[in-house]
Each structure stands twice: as structure tokens, then as C-alpha cells.
Image (cartoon, grey):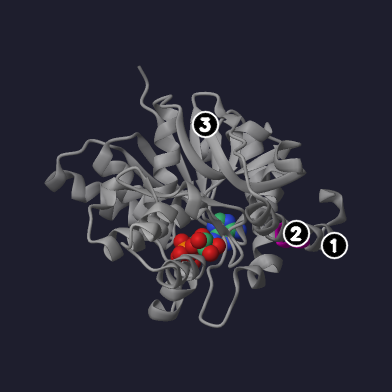
Amino acid sequence: MARTKIALIGGGMIGGTLAHLISLKELGDVVIFDIAEGVPQGKALDIAQSGAVEGHDCTLRGTNAYADIEGASVCIVTAGVPRKPGMSRDDLIGINLKVMEQVGAGIRKYAPNAFVICITNPLDAMVWALQKASGLPRNMVIGMAGVLDTARFQHFLAEEFRVSVQDVSAFVLGGHGDDMVPLVRYSTVGGIPLPDLVKMGWIRQDRLDQIVDRTRKGGGEIVGLLKTGSAYYAPAASALAMAEAFLKDKKRVLPCAAYLNGEYGVKGLYVGVPVIIGAGGTERVVEIDLNSAERAMLMKSIESVKGLVDACIKINPQLG
Ligand code: APR
């Protein structure tokens, strides 16, 4: 049986980390595409050589030609520019929208049957633009944000409660922006919902509010520390969890930017919601019950996403 081929569109910090992780996990052969000449080739060669030490047999190839992604089962898109200190994700829209148009055309031509995971920011608008530009079915184009935002929330909670991160489950809804919605009611430590832990005296409400706020600004915190770019280890790991769910038909329930067709009262936008990912791509959007405060926060987040999509349509009316 032919080995699975995974195409990484963008071979920068996240793309390189993805290539390394895919090889370590032996998830498939990797093609790294980038417009920068030499960079994807150099990273592919470097990681391939690590195989001699790690004992993996994955084939890695770097390329500047879209034709080389032909036959990929999964495409993970990080092409574009990342944030620098002082920039919001939304500041990237002008440059990265054009990149999504090019990437979409490449995928449409050479990997039309792939499951496509977009990471490029501003995420909720870029995944929308990528689906439009590629013309691929909406269930096969998805955005990575919720897994990362949830991982940040889980990490902060595990640190606060001094428990294993494996026993913390968290839930984040909405767009990948500072008004994302960490859902405290659906987040648990050892199965105990956070509001109950407040009642039990394990944490004060104002401390929990601080953690929620830190989660919302989690990406910016790392940009501020790195100064030259944005996070890449946790984003790569998060996208890979989604790719693995598809490749192994795991039916995982993961928060992702998914196309909404009436769910949560939203039509025609990509928004962060829990979905089931299996061999059919996004197989189901899970609609959970929200109270009025949670719904109001989600609606505010959706309005921001809508604003970004409108800005894309203004730049390229053909996308509308
Ligand atoms: N086609 C293909 N690759 C491109 C294009 C394009 N049109 N334009 C830029 N690239 C490549 C760059 O050459 C670079 O190697 O995309 C890569 C981006 O890598 P980094 O700058 O290292 O950015 P990274 O940290 O990987 O983040 C990528 O993910 O989280 C988001 O905000 C982040 O939008 C950013 C993206």
C-alpha cells in the first residue's frame, strides 16, 4: 500500500515543526512547499537526516512547485506572514488573503481530495477564504485554533491546580481572537466543572477570571516574548491532532473553526465550535447548550469574524 502523503504549504516555523513531528510519529511522507527557494529543501533534508538517529523511514521533500503536492491526503497550510509585537492577527489580512488565493488554486489543481487544515491568521477569515479559493467541499476544509486555545487554557489550569494536564479538560468556543469564549462551565479538573471548584474553595472567581483572560491573550503573550514571530510548537501539535483524527478515522471531538450552515444561528461563516473529525473530514458540528451570557459572548466573537470576512470581500469582491 502506498504511504500517506502529507503536504505542508508553508515551511516556516510551524511548517518545519510539523514536518519534524510527522516524521517522529511516522504519520506519512512529507512534502514541504514554500515560495522561499532553498528553505523547504533545507528543512526537509535536515529532518530526513534526523531519521538516521530517530529511526524513522519517512520520506521528506522540499519544493517550490505545487505539482509536488499531488496525491496528498492532508494539506496543512501555514503560508503567509506571522505577527510581530504590537500587531493583532487582523493586521495580517491584506497579505495573507492573497497568499490564501494562491494556495487555494494550488490545492484545487493538485490535491482536490485532501483534508485541508488552515493555520494562517487571522484564522477564521483565512480558512473561509481558503475554502472559497480552493473550491473544496466545506467539510474538507477546516481551521486550527480551538485545539490550541483549549491547550493553553488546559495548561494554565493544570499549573494553577498543580495537577496533571491529562486530568484537565477545557472548552473554548468562538473566533481565534481576543474575544474567544473559554467556556468555564464545560471545563473540568478530574471531571469536576470549574464553577464547582470555585464553590469548593479550590480557586477564587477573580483568579479564574485572570486565567480566562490570559487564555484569550495567550498568542499575544508568546509574540511579546519571542519578538520575531509567533508561537509554533503548540500550533503544530494542535494541527497534527486534527490531521491524525482524519487519517486514523478517530472520530475525535475537537474544537475547530468549522463552516456553519445554521448551527448556533450562523450561516456561511467559519467559527470555532466542537466538531467530530473522522475519515469524512468534519463529520458533524456539535451544538451545545449555551446560557444567555455565553451566547452573548459567542455572538460578539462571531461579529468580529464577520467583520474580518467583510474586509476580505472588500479586498476581493469575487470571494463574496
Ligand atoms: N506561498 C507559500 N508559502 C508562502 C507564501 C506563499 N504565497 N508566502 C509566504 N510563505 C511562506 C514563507 O516563506 C514562510 O516560510 O510561509 C512561511 C511562514 O512561516 P513563518 O514566517 O515562520 O510563520 P509561522 O510562524 O510558521 O506562522 C505561519 O501561522 O499561526 C499562523 O500567524 C501565523 O499566519 C502565520 C502562520
Q: Amino acid at mark 2?
A: Glu
Q: Position of residue 100 (x, y in %)?
A: 65, 53
Query: Can you identify the residue that label 2 sits on?
Result: 303
Q: Residue at x 12, y 47 (%)?
A: 53
Q: Quadrant of residue 306?
A: bottom right
**Front of the two marks 1 and 3:** 3
Name which of mark 2 and mark 1 comes first in the sequence. 2
Query: Can you identify the residue that label 1 sits on?
Result: 314
Asked if the residue at label 2 sits under 8 Å from ligand 1, the reply is no
Q: Which residues, given as a range, are shown in magenta?
A: 304-308
User: Of the numbered discs in the image, which one, if any, rests on residue 276?
Assistant: 3
Q: Residue at x 81, y 59 (%)?
A: 310
Query: Dividing the image into 4 quarters, which one contains the N terminus?
Result: top left
Magenta: main secondary structure:
helix
Q: Residue at x 47, y 35 (%)?
A: 253
User: How far is the residue under mark 1 from the one under mark 3?
Assistant: 33 Å
Q: Quadrant of residue 190?
A: top left
Q: Residues within 10 Å of mark 3 (few under 14, many from 20)?
A: many
Give 282 or 158, whichever is nearer the viewer: 158
Q: Amino acid at mark 1?
A: Lys
Question: Can residue 41 be seen in this snapshot?
Answer: no
- Secondary structure beneath label 1: helix
Q: Residue at x 62, y 36 (%)?
A: 287
**Mark 2–mark 1 CB contact (< 8 Å):** no
Q: Is residue 154 magenta?
A: no
Q: Position of residue 110 (x, y in %)?
A: 59, 35
